[in-house]
Every structure is written in structure tokens, then in C-alpha cells.
Image: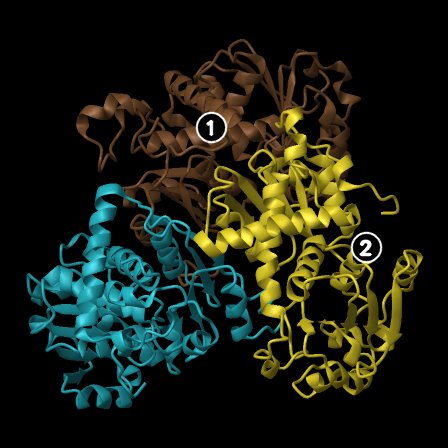
Chain colours: A yellow, B cyan, C brown
Amino acid sequence: MATFVPATERRTKSPHLPFGDRRDAPFYGMDILSVLQFRREDLDYIFGVAREMRSMVDRIGTFDLLKGKILANLFYEPSTRTSSSFLAAMERLGGSVIPINEVTYSSVAKGESLPDTVRTLQTYADVIVLRHPEVGSAKLAAQYTTKPIINAGDGTGEHPTQALLDLFTIQEELGRVDGLTVTMLGDLKYGRTVHSLSRLLSLFDVRINYVSPEILNMPPELLAELNRQGMAQRELTTLSPVLPETDVLYVTRVQKERFDDLGQYESVKNAYVITPETLEDAKEQMIIMHPFPRVGEISMEVDDDPRAAYFRQMESGLYVRMALLAMVLGKA
Amino acid sequence: MATFVPATERRTKSPHLPFGDRRDAPFYGMDILSVLQFRREDLDYIFGVAREMRSMVDRIGTFDLLKGKILANLFYEPSTRTSSSFLAAMERLGGSVIPINEVTYSSVAKGESLPDTVRTLQTYADVIVLRHPEVGSAKLAAQYTTKPIINAGDGTGEHPTQALLDLFTIQEELGRVDGLTVTMLGDLKYGRTVHSLSRLLSLFDVRINYVSPEILNMPPELLAELNRQGMAQRELTTLSPVLPETDVLYVTRVQKERFDDLGQYESVKNAYVITPETLEDAKEQMIIMHPFPRVGEISMEVDDDPRAAYFRQMESGLYVRMALLAMVLGKA
Amino acid sequence: MATFVPATERRTKSPHLPFGDRRDAPFYGMDILSVLQFRREDLDYIFGVAREMRSMVDRIGTFDLLKGKILANLFYEPSTRTSSSFLAAMERLGGSVIPINEVTYSSVAKGESLPDTVRTLQTYADVIVLRHPEVGSAKLAAQYTTKPIINAGDGTGEHPTQALLDLFTIQEELGRVDGLTVTMLGDLKYGRTVHSLSRLLSLFDVRINYVSPEILNMPPELLAELNRQGMAQRELTTLSPVLPETDVLYVTRVQKERFDDLGQYESVKNAYVITPETLEDAKEQMIIMHPFPRVGEISMEVDDDPRAAYFRQMESGLYVRMALLAMVLGKA
């Protein structure tokens, strides 16, 4: 986690690729484990491929770039959205999927270790997407398989494909990332989404406002990490002081279960709900994002506001995941 | 529900279709929500396409009419039969499927609303099949998505594709619908299948006998609705008086759980079980149907009787669903 | 079970095949229910096709031999490994899959009989793979459908595709089966895997050692059956006397739950765990196999030993299942 190694120097899994082709397929055989593995030029490359994917989907819907390739979609935790997104990405590229969602009852439930499970799956599949409740599980899995692992969330650890699609959405909606003010709202303590995104944003010239109830503040060690990289950061408990300057309002869910004192929950929850009234003080050219699912944090009346970018954000997820699958399989 | 608008005048979801192509793809972009949306000429059209599908499956098994299209198969309630039928229909047409069966634990379980879920899925898929326990859910979903919704059962509401395949089976087995006597047997109160089918039959010159224990009678308001359309209807508690005149015997399950008084259940249950003896009084050219699963309502000895049409009825489901998918996607 | 009928004489399900093509597709339309249906020449044929499959996968990954064919993967018990293996096999052959894993809640849960379920699925699919907890279920299913049934495990009964892949692994790893000494270790009473494999081995000139705690001995009636066929068999409670002569060490899991007396379990469990130290007395050219999942029976330090064949064994499963699917569908 500490040492930063550029993606282009860490290509270790290239079981079938002739050496001379490397330059043409810069992410071939790579694991996608953490946002920390990307440099700005890596992001430019990924987003360029994602734009091509969007253009192909717009024109012809589905195409056979990954025909004959098989994805094992291994979800130890349920996540309809993320698993469907990878499944659709693989299908739009003409590939096939082995969906493994019911790991709660299965050989895994019989006590099989993650290393054994991924070594089994690598005999069937060409790439493995892994969602697992434990921090570090994706890295562990990657050590035991010769096929690329894509981390689709490892506990409170990382969710790099979500952070990539978030950043891609910002870039596409506002045309740039440098110079923006990003305000993150809600549960900033447990949300791996905001942690991964803030790390990615630290590669850019960006200011971040963190707005949350005190018990759900950003982890101090993450603030320190970002501070060392020169990120301009500010912590608040209310949105109104920073909304007028905000270019990107990133909303997350404040979960009742996080509060010991339900009275405290009741007193703060409405402060973190976005309504058309909230947005009266916002810029005309800003965007509202949310990793979804939402349960009331943004009222449905906001959906028709052109600044509501969260459904377009989901769509971006499809293109970014298509790009990543094609790249690690050496086809982009 | 009251206002009847012909299908051909309600084409609102045509995001990609050039206007001039309308006549060639009459159901393009349409939702399939209720049997009430069909006129007789619509049924003729659907059944014509279904016959072509059967002919193609007979000759070559699978073909690439929907290659590149993705179906989201969204089942909030388990239904192996219906979900498998749509899945097979899409695969026989060369398309792909995102199966979402485990909605009990997923973002839906986390409290996500149906509108949010379908707006998510529309970013991945080209058409959405929805099974949901609440009446009106398919209509609600359709209001929030630009992709066609096919209602695969909304609580005690509608199950239009089942009714269409039932009617198609009658047409194909007996060569006509006009002039037939249809006898519906069993639980006529809660069975959405018989409700949807009787509504479809009201477009034809048909007589219906309803045979059920009194506590499972057809809903009076539905009887009234059909009566206003001139349908000849008769209610009975035993089958024998009407069996000799019956062309179509439509059997449904009488569920123990519907009875408060188990003694009452025991006293009536055998009156609604079909055996080879029952059929001694039946016509030679009649058919027996059942929406399945069955649990004893038709004894297995009846299966080899050529009048037992229920397995052929299932097969018809495949062709009708293939037809509907191809039609709403503008390919038939 | 008693009468042995060569596979080539029992071809009864050939609904579409012209009679004259029989010789070209010797397993077309056949059910794969039991290892007892195979003669040595059948095994040679299957393994020859499996080798072709491996060669094709090595060269091009996936190919369209079964394009347009649909497999119904019907699992009444969870088994991620076996169901994923069949799914991958079908996808690598260009076919489609209807996965049915959640039978605990579904029409099956509503009480539908296995015959009704398979007669439903045969209207959608071209071949059915069945895992079911009851002995004899695969045979029952086969009697009710015109489509080939492949038994993927019926309770404590048979698991023929596992036995075939086990035998194929032995053949490929050691170059022959005749003349080998096979030692089976662990739970030999309940393990259908070792039962099926020992029956297949009885077609060869092989010696078998059974090493197990007494309460988990091989069933006496199976020992007698194999004895009548001239198999050289020996029962032991410890591995060390026979390890030096062993060519194939087949390890299975000793489950705590099998013991009434946990003290007894604790006293024996370590005697059946394979470590690098255990293998000091083993041949250099022997192999270690395991049907997986493992939970401690083989320590992970053994994994890098070239004699550890269990991951290659899994991969063999893919090729054998591809071969069987292609064969029963008349394409090999």
C-alpha cells in the first residue's frame, strides 16, 4: 500500500502473450487491486478505452472483442449492481460469464479457502472478478492465480473500479478534473467508495470538502495520507457553507446502524438529504453523484434536474468495466 | 385498466427506431403489461410470429435474431419455470441474459426502490422482464424506464405472457378459439392465470364454465366485467355436469392453505383431481391444460393421454416469449 | 445396477439423428448415469475426445462446436465446483446454459415432482445435467425425458463424471492405468467419489489399498462386488505401510460430523493429513489426487510438489465434461 509502482512496470501475469506485443496491450495480464496502482497516464489510457467502448455500444450494442473469453464473477457478498455491471460488460464484449453468487452455501461454505477457490476457477475462466468481505482478499487471491483478478470490493478496503468510474464520470460530465472542488457528503468513515475516490483525486489539482456527522468523519490516517500528497482538504458538519463553490457533490448513505444513539441519528439525518431546495444554492454547472443504492439521501424530485448525474454515472460503470476487462485480457 | 387502447396506437418507447420503420415492427419498444392491451388482430400477429419461432427452433434450434441484445431477467419472487422460459427464449434467439434471482438479499434488500432498480438495469440491458409480488409493479417500472418492460407476473394482478401462451396453445391444439367451451377448474379466486386468460377469451365467441369450491369462486367484479363484454359464463361446484361439453379443461391447483377449515379442504379436494376415470365422460377432441407446477391435481396416469396438452403448453410458452422479445426489440 | 449393458448397445434417445449416422456419434442421445455403463473401449473413446478438447482449449480457448445448444444445469444441492465446471464446459463449446441453482425455493419447493421438472426443462434445453440428493434420481429423471441426462451426483449413489475425470487424470499423469497401485485415504464409507472410481478401476489390472478409520471403511458389499471382478484389494487403518508402493494417492476428507465420539475423531484425524513429511516415503513418480474441496487433509505446502496433481485433476474435469456434452449431443 505504501510503495507506489506504476502499472506499466508491474506486468507479471502474461502467460500467453508474446513479449513483443507488450507495448500494444499495456495492462495485459494485470490485476486491478487498488487505486494506488494507477498514475495519471494510466487513467488517461483507461478512459480513452472506455470512450471507445461507449462509442461501440452506442453504434452496435454488442461486439465480439472478447468472444471465447470467460469471466468468473465471484461474489462472496451480494451486490446486484456491481455483479450485473460486470456481467453486462462481459456480454457486451461477446464473452461468457460464470456467475457465482451463492457462495454462502457451496464449497466455500464447506470451508474451502480463497486460494483453493481461485485456483479452481482459473482452470475454467480467463479472468476473475472478486467481491469479498475481507480487506486484502483480492491481493491474496491474486497471489494464488495466474489469471487476472479484478477487485470488486474487499470489505472496507478498496473498490477501485467504482473509483475509476466515478472519476471517469467527473471527467466526462465537466470536461476536466483539475481545478474542481469536490464535496463528499454522508458516511465518510466506513464508505470505501469515498476513500478510493479521494485517493484517485489526489493525482489531480482538486480541493475536497468532507461533510459528515462527527462520528462518521473521514479516517484521520487517510486525511494525513492525502495531506502528505498536497491535497487541499476541509472537514465540515454542514453542507451549506461549501455548496455554492462545489463542482461535484458526491452523496453517500448515512446508515442508521452506524449510530449507537438513535436520537443522534434522527437529529442529523435530514441535514444530509438532497432536495430541489438544497440545490437552489448550487452552481448551474455542477453535478450530483451517488454510488447507489440510495435510500432517501437524494429525493426523487432531484432526478429530473440536469445536474443529477447518478444514472449517467452507472452507465459510465459499464464502459469503464468493459475497458478494464478488454485491457487485462490483452484486447485493448 | 378501464380504458382500452389498441396496442398499435400506444407505441411510446422507440428511442432508436427511425419513424418510417414503424409499420414494419408494430410492437417495437412497447411494454407488455396487461392482456387488456391486446386486440384480436394483435393476437393474430403475435401468434404468427410465435409459429415462425417454432418453425425456426424445429429446423435449427437457435438463431441469431437478437444477437447483441441483453435481457435483464428480474425476479423478485422465485419462479424457475417462468424465468427459465424467458432465459431459454433469449438464448434461442442468440441474445444474452442478466439473471437476477436473488433479490431477497441484494441492493433491493438494502431498500432500493423499484424505479431505481429498473433505471439501473436499463443502463446494462435492452429489455427487462419483471416478476414482482405487488399488483401494479410492472406498470410502475414501465413509467421509469426507456427500455421495454415485460410483466412476468405482478402479484395477484396480471401474468399476460402466460395468458398469451395459454390462448396460443388452444388455437394450435384445436385449430380455433371461436365456438369453444372452456371449463376452468380449481382455485379461481386467487389464480391470476385464469383471470388473465378469461379476459383474453372475452375477445372471442367462447363459453366459460367456472368449477370451484365456493370459497374459491371467481371474483364477482371480474365476472361482471366479462359479463358486460357479452361473455357466456356459468358457475358450478362440480365438474361432471359440464365435462361432456368441454373443449378445453383448464385445471389449477387447490391449495390447502386457502382453507381455514381443513375438514372442508379434505371434503372437496378429490372433487378437483383429474384421473383417467374422470376423462371417460370427456370428448375425444378436447384438451387438458394446467399452468404448472401441479401437485396432484392431475394424476400422472393422464400424462400419456393425447388430450393431455400441458407439456405442449409449456413448449408453446417458449415460442410465445421468443415472439414477444423479438417484437418489442423491433426484430419481428 | 447388476446387469452390465455396453454403452454402444443402449442408445435409445435419438430423436433427431438419422439412423445411418449412428456409427459416427457413438454416444449420441445417451444418458450418463453410472460408471457401470462403460467398457474399456468406451473410456478410450471418451478420453480421446477429452484430449481433443484440451488441445482445442489450449489453442483457441473457446469454439463453436455446440453453438445453438442449451444445457439445463439443474442443481438440487449446491456444488459450485461441479456446476461451474459444466457451465464452463458448455461455454467453451459455444453453447448456452440455463443455470438452476436455487431449487430450494422455486416450483420444486412448491412440491413439483422431478419427472415434471425435467419434462419442463426438456422443452427449453437440449441436455440436462442433474445433481440431486436422492440415490436413483438421475435414472428416474432419464426415464421421463427425451433429452440426455448427465448425472452430476445422486446422493450417496454415483458421480460418474467425477470418476471419469479421476481416471483420465491418472491416465494422463502416469501414462497408463494397468499395473498401478492406487491408495484411497480418508472417508471411504460415505464418499461416492471413491466408490465410483473403484468401480471404474475394476476394468483395469489395478491394486487398491483402502486406508481409513474403521468406522469409515469401504462398504462390505462394494468390496465383495469388486472382489468378484478379481480386483486386488487391501484394507488398512494407516497409510505408512502402503505409501512406498503407491502410484496414486487419492485423498478424501474425514468429516468430524461422521463421528459420534469426538475423542475418536481427534485421535485419528492427523493420521489422514498429508504434509511434505508424509511424502518423504512416497515414490518420485507418484501423484496425489483429491476431489476437492479440501479442508486441511492436504497441507498447502504440498501444493508446489510436482506430485500434487489435484489442480490439474480439476482442469481435466473441464475437458472430460466438454467431451461428454459434445458426445451426447452428437457432435464428437
Which residue bears the numbered disc 1? C320
Residue A196 percent location from the top left of the image: 77, 58
User: Mark 2 is on which residue type?
Assistant: Leu
Q: Is residue A273 visible?
A: yes
Residue B34 versus residue C251: which sits nearer the camera? B34
State the residue in front, C249 or C27. Answer: C27
Figure quadrant of residue B316: bottom left
Q: How many marks?
A: 2
As measured in the structure, the alpha-carbon distance from the residue carrying label 1 to the one carrying label 2 is 50 Å
Q: Residue at x 77, y 16 (%)?
A: C280
Front residue (pair C114, A18) = A18
Left/right of residue A99 with respect to residue A148 in the rendered view: left
Which chain does the residue under circle 1 lie in?
C
Taking B181 as reference, is C147 above or below it? above
Q: Residue at x 71, y 85 (%)?
A: A278
Residue at position x 88%, y 65% from top? Answer: A232
Q: Position of residue A228 (x, y in %)?
A: 93, 56
Q: Secondary structure at mark 2?
A: loop
- In the rendering, at what x and y percent does residue A22 appear? 67, 31
In the shown orientation, is residue A123 left or right of residue C125?
A: right
Q: Is residue B261 found left or right of C276 in the rendered image?
A: left
Q: Is residue C234 left or right of residue A211?
A: left
Q: In terms of image quadrants, where is residue A162?
A: bottom right
- Where is the C terminus of chain A found, in terms of image quarters? top right
Which residue is at a point 82% across and 64% down the rendered structure image? Answer: A206
Image disc number at residue A203:
2
Residue C103 visible, this angle: no
> Which amino acid lies under the numbered mark 1 shown in the image of this protein?
Val
